[in-house]
Amino acid sequence: MVDIAVIINNKAKNAHQLEKYLQGFTQHKLDYQLYKTTPKNLEQTIKQCRANHPILLVGGGDGTIRSAAQWCAHTSTLLGVLPLGTMNHFAKEVGLPLTVDDLIEAIKKRTTTLIDLAEVNGNVFINNSSIGFYPKLAQKRDYYTKFYNKWLSYIPSFIQALFYHRSYSLLVKSKEFNLLLKTSFFMISNNPYSYEFPLKFTRESFKEGLLGIYYFKHGRLRFFEILRALFTKKHNFDIKQASCPIELTIHHKEKIIISLDGDTMTVQTPLHYKSLPKSLLLLTNNHENNSHL
């Protein structure tokens, strides 16, 4: 059995770019076993490959990489990313190889990094998880992508989510603080985001073992509230961070739809969030500009 498994989500936005990676591997005499799979069978394929290959190169967007992280966390499996999704936020933020040549160099040199993950009720995420407005947006987006491309689908999805999302009564508990909220937007991230005007959200580190917490202080989101949050310092949003686990109780809800890295799922309440420090081994660039990791 060869060391490298190449696993491709064949529904990824840029799955057609796979061939240039395979050609590069062949030219550099890197042996691999190719596995093409559907979103439905993705996690089972990853589980099987993890048992047989020490290196998994997984192609897709952030949702696909989240599925790989779920099964590679706390193992010796080395995960590499083929950024074949729509936006590939995670690969860009962490500083992973974004070209064929850079990925091949990382494989040959075995340049790696250990990063944090986060978890809610046993479900790992690499970027963020939320309740309220964003899961509604993601559900609508998934519906409209049946008829439009993914970028266009965000327009009707945003409008409908803005009008039809609901507020939740939340009790947020940790060793560091307690919050009682009635909000339509609550998000937790794997390490804190920083904001750069006008629309850039980045994480300076994936190794702090922290959770970022972002929430609308009360009521439902309105369009002008979103603009105010982006363009002024005084607004109805608040930001915190936590080094301890967080329990999130949603009053009068036994189950709730949450988002995980852009995908949605229904989970039992309460929600238990925690950081998983240095839990994922990644192939990375051997560049000085990744020293912040």
Image (tube, grey):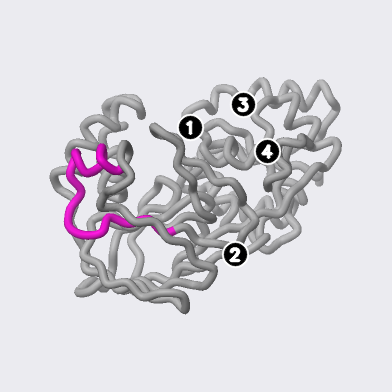
**Pointer 2: what residue?**
276
Q: Nearer the viewer, mark 2 or mark 4?
A: 2
Q: CA distance from mark 2 to mark 4?
A: 26 Å
Q: CA distance from mark 2 to mark 1?
A: 25 Å
Q: Nearer the viewer, mark 1 or mark 4?
A: 1
Q: Is residue 38 above or below residue 53?
A: above
Q: CA distance from mark 1 to mark 4?
A: 20 Å
> Residue 69, position in %: x, y?
59, 53
Residues tagged 3 and 4 counted as in contact (Cβ below 8 A): yes
Q: CA distance from mark 3 to mark 4?
A: 10 Å
Q: Is residue 4 magenta?
A: no
Q: Nearer the viewer, mark 3 or mark 2?
A: 2
Question: Helix, strand or loop at disc 3?
Answer: helix
- The magenta segment is 213-229
Q: Residues within 10 Å of mark 3 (few under 14, many from 20)?
A: some
Question: Helix, strand or loop at disc 2?
Answer: strand
Sequence-first tag of 1 and 4: 4
For image coordinates 47% across by 55% down, the residue present is: 189
> Residue 275, position in %: x, y?
55, 65
For image coordinates 14% across by 47% down, the residue present is: 164
Residues tagged 2 and 4 counted as in contact (Cβ below 8 A): no
Q: Amino acid at mark 2?
A: Leu
Q: Amino acid at mark 4?
A: Val
Q: Amino acid at mark 3?
A: Leu
**Pointer 3: what residue?**
18
